[in-house]
Every structure is written in C-alpha cells, then in structure tokens.
Image: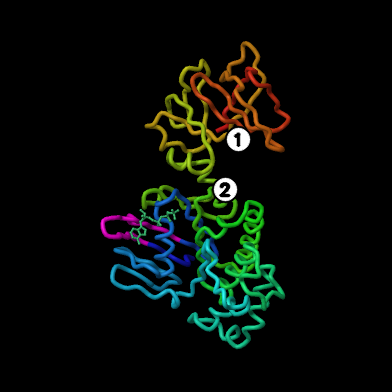
Amino acid sequence: MNNAVVTGVSKKFGEVTALHSIDLQIGDGEFVALLGPSGCGKTTLLRLLAGFESPTSGEIWINHERVADGSYRKPPEQRRIGMVFQSFALWPHMTVYENVAFPLRHQQDVPDAYRQNPRERVAKILDMVGLGGMEERYPSQLSGGQKQRVALARAIVFDPSLLLMDEPLSSLDAELRMQMRKEIQHIHRELGTSIVYVTHDQSEALAMADKIVVMRGGKVEQAGTPQEIYYSPQSSFVAKFVGRANFVKGKWSDRETFIMEGQDIPGIRVAHDYSPFYQENVLPVRPDQVKLRAWQDGTEAIRGRVKHVQFQGRELLYSIQVGGEEWEAVCDIRDQFAFGEEVAVELHV
Ligand code: ATP
C-alpha cells in the first residue's frame, strides 16, 4: 500500500522549471532517499510533499487523500507530517520538553492519548532518541548531535504519517553522522513511519534507504533499491553519481557479451541488464567488481599495471593502468600487488 503518491508533478518558479512531471510512490513504512546533485530539485519536491509550496501541475496524495494539485494545497499543519532540517530549527527560548511537546498542541489529528498525557509521550520519545532526562535543558545547553535528536523527537512525537528529512546529518561531524545513521534506522524500524530523506551523500542513501530516487535536472533519472541502483545503473550519470565506476570501452556483440577495445581477450559475459549502455559502447564496472591476479605470460586476460596503491584497513584501493585508461579496483588485503607490477584483470560483472 502506498503512503504517498506523486503523479505528473511539475513546479515552476517564474522562468525556472525546478521539477518536470515527477512520478513517485512512497510505500507504507518505506524509507525513500532523494539523491542528486545541487539544484536537481530534491528540496523542492520535499517542500511540495510538506505543503510549503503548490505544484504548478500534477497531484500529490498522502494517506489516500489528495493534498495538492494545480489549484489546491492543504496546509502543512493539516498533513500530519514530521520534518527535520539540516539547521535543527529548534526554538531557543523553549526547553527540550517544550520543543518536543509543541506539535502535540499545534498539529491536527494528534492521537488523544498523546494530547492528554504529553509528559508521558515526550518522555517515551526522548528515551527513544537517547535523551531521556534532558527535558529541562535549553537548546544552547546541548551539543550538535543532541540538538538534532531533539529535532528528530519533535518530528516523530505526534506519530506522523510521513517523516520528511532534508539533509539532517550534514551539519554534524563524520563520527556523529555515522552514529545518527544507525539511530535514524533504529527509529524507522521502531515506528514503521514512511520516510522521505533528501541527501546529496550517496553513501548515506545506499546505507539507509529501501528505495533510492536519483534526480537530475528536475527529473527522476532512476529509482530502485540500493542494490539495483548500484549494480544496474541505467545511465552513465547514475553510475558516476552513486558509487564509483570504471567505464570500459568496447562494443556490445549481443546483450550479454562485451568485446573490450584494444585487448586480445574473449568477450566479457555480463550477468546484469546493461541495455542503456549498448549505444554508448561502454561497460560500467564498479571497483569492487574488478579482481586482480598476478600476471603470467600466456594468460588470456586483460593486462594491467599497478599505478597506485592505497591502504584502507581491510581493503586495498588500486589504480590500474589498462591501455590508455586508469581503472580503480578495491581488493581484499590478501591480494597484494606492488607498485609497477603487471597484473591480470578480471571483471566480475
Ligand atoms: P541543493 O542540494 O543545493 O539544496 P536541490 O536539489 O534541493 O539543491 P532545489 O532547492 O529543489 O534543489 O532547487 C531546484 C531548482 O529550483 C534550482 O535551479 C533552484 O535555483 C530553483 N529554485 C528553488 N526554489 C526557488 C525559488 N523559491 N525561486 C526560484 N527558483 C527556485
């Protein structure tokens, strides 16, 4: 069942078309990441879902109710939507308790039990985000990570039907970001609320989302599970933007066989759908799909030479010179090759 449906939504700001006929479905309890470079329309789409903006055309449905079209917009406070922003947006003159309890009074359709016992509800949610007992502090007495937890608590306290998050972790340092990723996943599992999460950080989207919607120039470039997006990118843009990719040059002899340029080797057999790349005469290969072996004369394999090696804990990141191209390969720490060494390169695609 879908919790929110966007059909044919376009948004113009004067001459600028920020969104071109977007279709999107957010399933019940689904965690959807909107991913794309700056200016691709992620925030505009989120603001339309929230009700801060009206679509120029198209329709938005939340919980089986039409909340916006070209001539109608239901206001944000009537949509039962929780929101978390990069800037936290807490009220500095209110305590943690007052900040978190605020929506219980001001949102519509709040369950009666929460309105009648706000103390109990707020305490439960603060426990869930790891801030139990901090009710009486003011935002200025909290760390950045704690402020973001308060913002999260405030967004979920009234049991929203949809939780919208706009780059919620980008103002936190790297370690805290990793920790908060886990907490957001935990809260998502506990509450089962549908989430739309805007980010330009592909690792965040890959790590957390059930579905990734890659946007480009106001359009959906590709939507799918993290695995589909990573292993079956449908365009060079997606292959480059989500994860890293080597673009191997050559020709497709049929749907499953790629003949590499400049190497005297049999065709490479592929296991995924690469149809968008048939015309481009390339095969996108992820660095973790490249395997290296020691070179032996007489081997029928792609011949490469190690140009750089970087130690990365359990893995080694190699740059391999193959003909005129430089490829990246991520290998197990046991597969060690020296700078300048000749290697046989296998592509597991
Ligand atoms: P970022 O990652 O930088 O926040 P984004 O993907 O969220 O980018 P949007 O903020 O949705 O992108 O902007 C999409 C396009 O619409 C951009 O070209 C932007 O300049 C334009 N735009 C957004 N809001 C307005 C506005 N209020 N008036 C005019 N143009 C706008």
Residue position marked by numbered label 1 in the rendering: 288
Image height of 29 relative to 73, above or below: above
Q: Amino acid at mark 1?
A: Asp
Residue situated in front as seen by the camera: 89 or 266: 89
Q: With 113 as the anchor, is 200 left or right in this view?
A: left
Q: Residues within 10 Å of mark 2 (few under 14, many from 20)?
A: few
Q: With 66 as the anchor, is 196 left or right in this view?
A: right
Image height of 168 relative to 273, above or below: below
Q: Quadrant of residue 190?
A: bottom right
Q: What span is colored magenta in the figure?
A: 7-25
Mark 2 falls on what kind of element? helix
Q: Which mark is residue 203?
A: 2
Quick one: label 2 or label 1, which is nearer the N terminus?
A: 2
Task: Give how far across and how far down residue 91 sits, in percent.
Answer: 54, 74
Q: Quadrant of residue 29?
A: bottom right
Instruction: Residue at 58%, 78% (x, y): give it.
Output: 94
